[in-house]
Amino acid sequence: MKLILTFIAALSAAPAFADVAEVVDQHILPGYAAFTDAARTLSDAADADCTPEAVRPAWNAAFDAWLGVSHIQFGPVQDAGQNVAIAFWPDERSAGPRALAALIANNDPIIAEPGGTTRLSVGARGLFGLEYLLFDPQFTDAGPYGCDLIRALSADLLQMAAGTQGAWEDNYANLLRTAGDAGNAIFLTSEEGTQILFTSLLSGLEFASDKRLGRPMGTFDRPRPTRAESWRSVRSLHNVDLSLQALRDLTVTLTENDAPRTMAAFDRALDLVAALDDPDLSGVSDPQGRFKVEIIQQAVDAIQAAALTEIGAQLGVSAGFNSADGD
C-alpha cells in the first residue's frame, strides 16, 4: 500500500515553530557536504585500488552519508534526476544487473567517454550499481573492465554529489531560507518552505515503513528477504537505523526540539532497531523474525502518526491521505 501525501497550508493562527533556515544550515547543507566528502573518498579509494575488498569500506561510508540526506527529495537532487541515479531502489525489473552484465560482456567503451556514465541506465549507476560490482558474486570478478567500471561509477557518484551540493550552496539554500519573499519564484509563501520540509519528514518515514521494512516482509505466507534494501552488502537494518536517525535530526531542527511525543516515538523505534540482531533482515523468513520486523514497522508508523498530530498542528499544516495500490 502506497500513501500519496497531499499537503494544505492551514491559514490559521496556530503558532508555527519551524525554523526553516536552521534546517537548511544545520541539516541539509552539512548533510550534502558530508555526502560529497564521502563520495570523494570513495572515488579516491577506487583509483588507488579498485578491488572490491579495498573499495567496500569507502562505499559503505558513502552510503551512510547518503542516508543523512536521502529524504531530501526536492530541489537540485530532483531537478536533475540525481536522486534516482544516486540510489535506484527498489529496482522492480532488475534493470541494474542486466545493464551491468551487458556492459561487462561487451567491454562497452562508453564508460571511458566524456559524460559516458551519465548515459548509462540509472539502474547501473550510483550506490546500487556499485553494490552489485562490490558484493554480488556475478560481478565481483569481472576482470580489468570491472575495475574500470568501479572507478567510472565512483567518479560519476562524486560528480552527482558535488553537483547537488553546489546547486544547494549557490542558490537553492537561499531560496528555501527566503520562502515567501518578493521575487522568490519557487516558494511563493513562507508556509511553502515549512510544508516541503514536513513533506520530506513524512515521506521519509513512509519509505522506511513501506519499502525498507515492508518489502522484505512480503506477506506472512510469502516473505521476500532478498527484496530488502542492500541485502547483498548485509546493511539492510543499518539503512533503517541511519535513515531514522536522519529523520529524527530533521525533526529536531524543524521543531526547535519541541515535539516530545514525536521524539519519544523516534526513540522507541530506534531502540527496537538497535535490539534486533538481523542485519540483512533475512529473519523475516521465520515467523518470529517477521514479527520482530513488523513491530519495528508499527513503531515507524507511530512516528508518522505522532508527527501528523503534534508537528502538523503546531506548524499549521494538515495532511490528507489517498490510498493507492503499490509495492
Image (cartoon, rainbow, N blue to C red):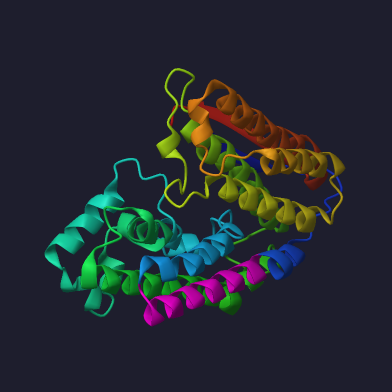
Q: Is residue 78 above or below residue 234?
A: below
* Image position, residue 287 (x, y; %): 54, 21
Q: Which residues are magenta?
A: 28-50
Would you say residue 2 is visible in this rendering? no
* Image position, residue 311 (x, y; %): 78, 43
Q: Is residue 284 left or right of residue 181?
A: left
The picture quadrant where one finds residue 160 is: bottom left
Secondary structure mostly seen in magenta is helix
Residue situated in front as seen by the camera: 60 or 123: 60
The picture quadrant where one finds residue 65 is: bottom right
* Image position, residue 114 (x, y; %): 26, 80
Q: Is residue 40 left or right of residue 21?
A: left
The picture quadrant where one finds residue 184 is: bottom right
Residue situated in front as seen by the camera: 203 or 50: 50
Would you say residue 290 is visible in this rendering? yes
Name the residue located 46 percent from the left edge and 40 percent from the top edge.
228
Where, quadrant-wise, is the C terminus in this rendering? Answer: top left
Residue situated in front as seen by the camera: 180 or 127: 127
Judge whether residue 46 is colored magenta: yes
- Extreme residue toward the left, this view: 106
Residue situated in front as seen by the camera: 33 or 134: 134
Name the residue located 55 percent from the left edge and 65 percent from the top edge.
61
Count of numbered labels shown in the rendering: 0
* Image position, residue 324 (x, y; %): 47, 28
Q: Is residue 263 left or right of residue 91?
A: right
Name the residue located 52 percent from the left edge and 38 percent from the top edge.
281
Q: Is residue 75 above or below residue 17?
A: below
Q: Is residue 17 left or right of residue 3?
A: right
Name the residue located 69 percent from the left edge and 66 percent from the top edge.
24
Judge whether residue 41 is colored magenta: yes
